[in-house]
Image (spheres, grey):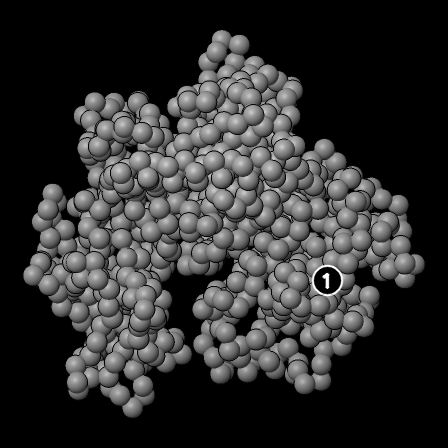
Amino acid sequence: MAKPSLCLIISLDIIITIFIFSVHLNNAQSVKYHPEANLSTTWINNNPTIYINSTNVFAGFQMTPVLSLSNTSQFVSGFYCFSNESSCFFGIVIFAERYDLEDYTIVNAPRLVWSANRDRPVETNATLKFTGTGDLILEDADGDMVWSTNTGGKSVMGIRFTESGNLVLFDRNNARVWQSFDHPTDSLLIGQKLVSGQKLIARTSSSDCSQGLFWLSIRYRLLSGYFEANPPLVYYETILEGISNFTDSEEEYVVFKNGSFNGQSIALGSTAQFMRLEPDGHLRVYEWGGAEWNTVADLLTSGIGECGYPMACGKYGICSLNGQCGCLEGSNNETRNFNQINYKQPNLGCSLVTPITCNDSQYHSLLELNNTSYFILNSPYITEMNEKIQLEDCKNACLRNCSCKAALFVYEIFDFTLRRGCSLLFDVFSLINNEGGSTNVSVFLKLQNSPTKQPTSPIDFPQKKSRRGTIVLGSSLGALFGVCLLVGSCILVFKRKRELEELDDEFSVDKVPGMPTRFSYGDLKTATNDFNDKLGEGGFGSVFQGTLSDGTEVAVKRLDGLSQIKKSFLAEVETIGSIHHVNLVRLTGFCSEKSHRLLVYEYMPNGSLDRWIFRQEHTLGWKSRKNIILDVAKGLAYLHEECRQKIYHLDIKPQNILLDDHFNAKISDFGLSKLIDKDRSQVVTTLRGTPGYLAPESLSSFITEKVDVYSFGVVLLEILCGRKNLDRFQPEEDMHLLSLFKRKAEEGMLLDLVDNHNDEMQLHGAEVVEMMRLAVWCLQGDFTRRPSMSVVVKVLEGSVDVENNLEYSFTSPAVPRTIAAAGHIEGVISAGTPPLPSTLSGLR
């Protein structure tokens, strides 16, 4: 009798659910099955007809269908919204079971397997437009463009949603022009390929769909798992199935089949299956088990084990082979060096009792760990180590480099290849307790000792020896022979000096901490099609679009000129290569070969900000502009306050603010950057930058981070007003934006300055004018009255108010009396502190 009772309970639950829905949703329209649509079709996110099976109607999610299949299908495409209706995604959903009623549909356990706008949710009344030119465009409720297939003008004739869960745009010959299967997010469906150049990127967390820290991609005929670090780290690699069948001209890929993935067997699905790269780096296959989605395969774990994931036990955590987490503990006679972050959640990792500080580097020491390994050694194909460095040199290199947190030395490992050498770690993620395993690996963790405690194993740094060359001249030689000898010697010395300078240059570049990938000149020449696709002019050179051998799109800057080529190159590599932030353009590689100096950046599809605020044919709505303003503020706050050394950009302008495919803003072009020790808030130097964005005090060569705040204020006004700060097409009295702004403020007519080329900006005019007050605060002539960028971020987030009694005269007052003359300050700095690690690199 137990089984009938269970069925009865389930039936009653469904009946109750249906009854509740019928009470609350009697005005909903009926669900219709439309797997295709023609050009010039529009869908609005305001009519949800699909709900989750729950006794609480307003819990879970709701969905407005766009294209749907028959009632036997387990896929639907449309607007997927959480209960608050302010976080919606256009995407594809897989679900377990469905109950189609007259006016709505109830589904069990929906899972979002593809999304067009994972990093930028939209709200109710967002619109999906299938234009007459064949472009599929997603716009938010305020009219901002959020996403597009960029297929306008490509002969698209229709859109189709297939039984396999693939969204396809096709032409008059029924050929595919665009498909969602070519743009995976964090999931794969049966029959879907992951192709070289594509990435499967995990979400941030189970409740946050934005891009997280792990991704899976194909390169060099390997399936590789990466962890977002600086630089990115490989935690899994394996050869592609059927690699011998690939030719050099064929694309490399792996396909999720019903029953296998890259040679690994998966239980044949009796119900719906999907694969997802999870926020913890696991690649799991799920199948509906009648009550929930069950894991039927954990594909990477079979190769690397539970401890092979970078964050299995958090930073500095020790992962035992049984998957348990803990911290390193000293013996009874030793001081504890690590604390558990949360004893109830040991997988969150450990922290150093005494944080490492660069100010007391003379008290650094190394703690050797026995029977310990690290996740980057899991794969036999990972060779990111220097085989030429010996053990003591490896340890010394870490002690000399403040950014180094640990040294990894491999005496010898032989799996498929023989590996040995040194690798410096700039972050310490989960360590692996390898007791009983290989003892050919040593891990040396850097510790901060107190001044009274000497390192247990002091390491002496080798001293440099000077050489003295002796030239013996014979007094009996004639004057002519002496002159010839002198000239010949000068030529040889000059030649040798040039060679040493070039060697020193190469050495300096190679030793930059966290160095991105080094490319040959030939690699980049091929990637850019012989430097034919020019994107524009950047600092010190031209920028070209390129595609690397693995399909990754990049922007390659070829540095031109001779006088400051070395300084600008090292400034950009050392600055961008050693930091990483979501609002800073990432330097992914470089080339230093003979006289060639090139920088390889991530590609930003929507170009620079000036294209979107100064041209009437391309305008951004209010929400997009607010997001961009906040992005730039966060990027500058990171440079000023969160880096180990302060970084002044010194050339903030719309041309140096780039936009990705979702219009997220990132700061670029660090050629004018200056690294400043954090305990030195003011620097006297010769400033060069872009006229119109320079702070008034820069004319007196007195520089703080507030010069960037001033430039940000100018850019902020340009974004709000939709015009350049110097516009020669305006009447003479309106040519200068700051002067015009002051006059309009005095007249109480600031609404006149709101960008009149965009209806959304006019609609939110009051908010725009309120944000102009923040611009005024940033533009104060007295730099001491300007806010820091972290305060600017708080203002934009609504937690801090703009100061009152602001000056609308944006010129510089006299230098405060407490500040000495420029020449005197410069002498004090040079006498009391070491030289700055980089120099200004010239006029843009």
* Residue at the spot 62% in from the left edge and 65% down from the top edge: 794
Q: Amino acid at mark 1?
A: Leu
Say which residue label 1 marks: 774
Q: Could you tell me which residue is drawn at 21 percent across and 69 percent down? A: 444
From what the image shows, is residue 682 above or below residue 149?
below
Q: Is residue 824 left or right of residue 344?
A: right
Q: Residue at 31%, 86% (x, y): give it.
A: 450
Name the quadrant containing residue 807. Answer: bottom right
Could you tell whether 338 is left or right of 798 in the image?
left
**Does residue 574 lie above or below 527 as drawn?**
below
Q: Position of residue 565 (x, y in %)?
A: 48, 52
Along the line of sight, the residue nearer the viewer: 157 or 248: 157
Front residue (pair 810, 583):
583
Q: Which quarter of the figure has residue 745? A: bottom right
Helix, strand or loop for disc 1: helix
Percent position (x, y) of residue 33?
A: 53, 20
How far from the left and from the top, in percent, is residue 684? 60, 73
